[in-house]
Amino acid sequence: MFNDLITFGLTALAGYFAIANPISATPIFIALTSDDRPVVKRQIARNAVFTAIFVVVLFSVAGKLIFEMFGITMAALRIAGGILVSIVGYQMLQGRSSSVQVPHQVEGEEGAADVIKAQLSIAVSPLGMPMIAGPGTIATAVGFAANPGFLYTIVSICAFLVIAALTYIMFMQAQRIVRFLGETNLTVVTRLMGLIVATIGVGMVITGLSDAARDFLQTIQAIPLQRPI
């Protein structure tokens, strides 16, 4: 039993690392927080990681129930997340502040509290979800939690906590990466990451559409046909 849990934990750790991919999330964090003060960046990193942990724990414990209650399919979740990520990537590609970072109605106002609140909002979306805890991560969490025995769910959550901690550490090293790159190179990286983020979003949409089409065809094929008289 103990050996099975160890093996399962290593598998979950590798699966979450491949899906959440903290290495690829770090340049996106840099691009989205390039104009923020260090204290705000730390808050965004912390809130993003906590958001991802909350989402994974929620869907690990009650994912199947939530999907059934609201009639949510993984295909719909992939499409919605992909559209959001694509919008963020497009705005990064244009070399201007994303409305996801500082919404238009807040940007330029004198209320510093409102500006900080708007800056922190990116921790929930798109950083926390769907960049860290995206459709793939949620599907992985639900799949791991489907194993018999609550211990497997606990091990799966612990595996993601390790990935979340690694993501936070890499986010905290973002300032050193910025100093190493310099302002000009950072602008180039921001536009490049915008293209990559937009591509990731389009890929999520395509995958979601493919899943939806496959589910539709399976539903059609399952309909019994009347034999000709």
Image (cartoon, rainbow, N blue to C red):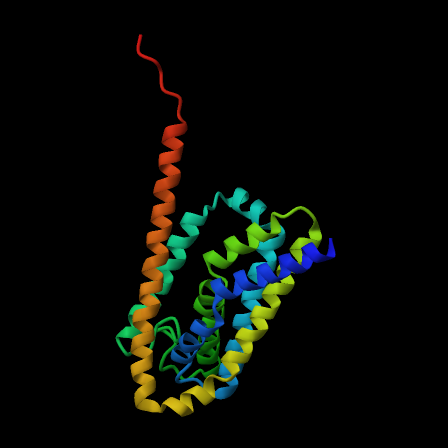
Place of residue 62 in the rendered image (x, y in percent of width and height, measured from the top left): 61, 50
Give the residue drawn at x 56%, y 51%. 142
Say which of 48 and 17 sits in front.
17
Position of 79 with respect to 146 (left or right) is left
Quarter occupied by residue 60: bottom right
Q: Which residue is drawn at 35% across and 35% down?
A: 217
**Which residue extends farthest front?**
3
Q: In this view, does 49 lie above or below 152?
A: below
Asked which quadrant contains residue 54, the reply is bottom right
Establish if 156 lies above or below 224: below
Return the residue found at the far right. 1
70 to the left or right of 33: right
Residue 189 drawn at (x, y percent): 33, 80
Tell me where residue 104 appears, x and y as whole percent: 34, 74
Q: Residue furthest top?
A: 229
Q: Residue lying farthest left?
A: 94
Task: Find residue 37 and report its horizontal and vertical position in percent.
Answer: 46, 87
Quick check: 108 left or right of 122?
Answer: left
Q: Is 41 located above or below residue 70 in the figure?
A: below
